Image (tube, rainbow, N blue to C red):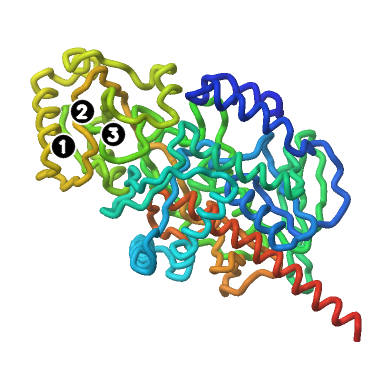
Amino acid sequence: MRRRKWLTILTSGFLFSQAHSISTVLASNLETQNQTSNASINAEFDVLIIGAGGAGLSAAVAAREAGAKRVAILEKSAIVGGHTMLSAGTVTVASDGDRTVQELMNDIVAMGGRRSLARTLAEQSGATLQWLSDMDVAWEAKLFRAVGSGTGTPRNLSTGSQRGGWDIVQALASRARKLGVEIYFEHRAIKLIQDSKTHHIVGVVAKTLNGKEKTIFAHAIVIASGGFSASQKLQARFAPNIPTVSGSTADTMGMTPDLASGDGIRMGEEVGAKLVDMDAIECIPYTGGRVLDFAGAEIWLNAEGDRFVNEEASFDVIAGAMQNQTGGFMWTITDAKSKKGANFGTKLVAGIVREASSLTVLAKETGISYEKLVDTMTAYNNMATTGHDPQFGRTTFNQTIDTPPYYFGIERLSVHFTMGGLLIDEKTRVLDHNEHPIPGLFAAGETTGGVHGRKRLSGNALTEAFVFGRIAGREATMFVQEDRLKSDLSHSK
């Protein structure tokens, strides 16, 4: 898909709610970024990054800040942002010192994450979010519980805007541009170049839209090309038993295809990288009736009109419960009072989310008997008033749901996040099958494995991208500087 076609789609007003504001941002920023999609690439780079999403942009900025002289990003699409751009922008922070760092680390380890990586994410979360704040990302000064967080501790943050993910992408892209980071759009990395004697990764082969292959050399490579939510081939190979799903959450109703095809994972495997947790794929309700990013203002009902799960449980619990319901779907219902997420306008225009002026209309539209719906909603509102859920133990109730119009829609499971990928250490070095670093190769974001384990806490995906992306940029630069020093010393003898 060509760059201008991407811009046309993204500014159309259909893909995003609040289209007037997002179109202004896209028009003014994307068109002025380094437009190097057809440029020749002749020089050798200090650090070369694959992928211009949240992790890749973080790595690029951190590399330049650490002293890397020439930094470039290869991006296979026509714009920056990746999955981060499409996200609600929810992050996780351990905010109150050692206790919350330990709690967050323990929660990640309990999900199967490696302790060293979990500790790094928890310990670096606060400093990394401050780093983004210094780039003018304006976090809303209120901790909340994101949907799927599965914990009683409020530790999620967002910008509070209708375009949270893009707020962060815009800040990182602006900073990268000011630092002179080169971005080569429509360049898909297809192969890593490895020195046969030293096993050092020394470059990348990339393919342009016209099929031309280019070889780009660099002293260090950072893979930040995302997971494999769009690759049915990799899903069939590693996770043949995932539940029946409705596409990917990054495929926005077919308007912008999910490009997370596992390229970086495949390339890493080809040079001997160890893969971990590849069968751990997160499927969530997202592309249908859900319009809130936080737990506390939605009720979820099955076809019979019953609540069937704690709406603030972790996503694996929610997915398991949904699979046991008639038809494998649920109705999500909120009202006029709730604070809607970024996808609300889009879904409303598309008819995915509908409006009901009363419970009578809502019952008719959902096919739930009026008496049953009234009983269920009355019971829910009583729980919201008392803060006590005797059936499922829910504790977060931001409001009652009793103010028309009601907003509702069917929700099914979609692939959202792939926990598995290239095994890294706390310095983001990619490890081989003996868990030794592959020289010159680093990775960050959803292309990696070992951080989350078998499950993922809501908000941790973006936090992982920014924390480990930042570390990857710094560590790659340090590797280059040390390698250059060793070379200078050997030549001086």
**Residue 30 visible, this angle:** yes
Kind of residue at badge 1: Ala
Is 51 rendered above or below residue 304?
A: below
The quadrant the C terminus occupies is bottom right
Q: CA distance from mark 2 to mark 1?
A: 9 Å
**Tag count in the figure?**
3
Label placed on residue 384: 1
Residue 113, how many percent across, how many down? 42, 63
Kind of residue at badge 3: Gly
Kind of residue at badge 2: Ile
Label placed on residue 328: 3
Helix, strand, or loop for circle 2?
loop
Residue 383, by quadrant, is top left
Residue linked to disc 2? 401
Residue 366, by quadrant, is top left
Helix, strand, or loop for circle 1?
helix
Q: Is residue 410 left or right of residue 219?
A: left
Which marked residue is nearer to the observer: mark 1 or mark 3?
Answer: 1
Q: CA distance from mark 1 to mark 3?
A: 26 Å
Q: Is residue 371 left or right of residue 305?
A: left
- Residue in the picture at 68% in, 53% down: 60
Residue 263, how many percent across, how many down? 63, 48
Looking at the picture, tell me which residue is in the foreground, 422 or 270: 422
Residue 154, how many percent across, how many down? 31, 51
Is 104 rendered above or below residue 85?
A: below
**Residue 315 visible, this angle:** no
Helix, strand, or loop for circle 3?
helix
Label 2 CA crowd tier, 10 Å (few <14, some 14–19, many 20+): many
- Residue in the picture at 71% in, 43% down: 188
Q: Are marks 2 and 1 in contact (CB under 8 Å)?
A: yes
User: Going from the N terminus, do you reach mark 2 or mark 1 first?
Assistant: 1
Looking at the picture, tell me which residue is in the foreground, 181 or 76: 181
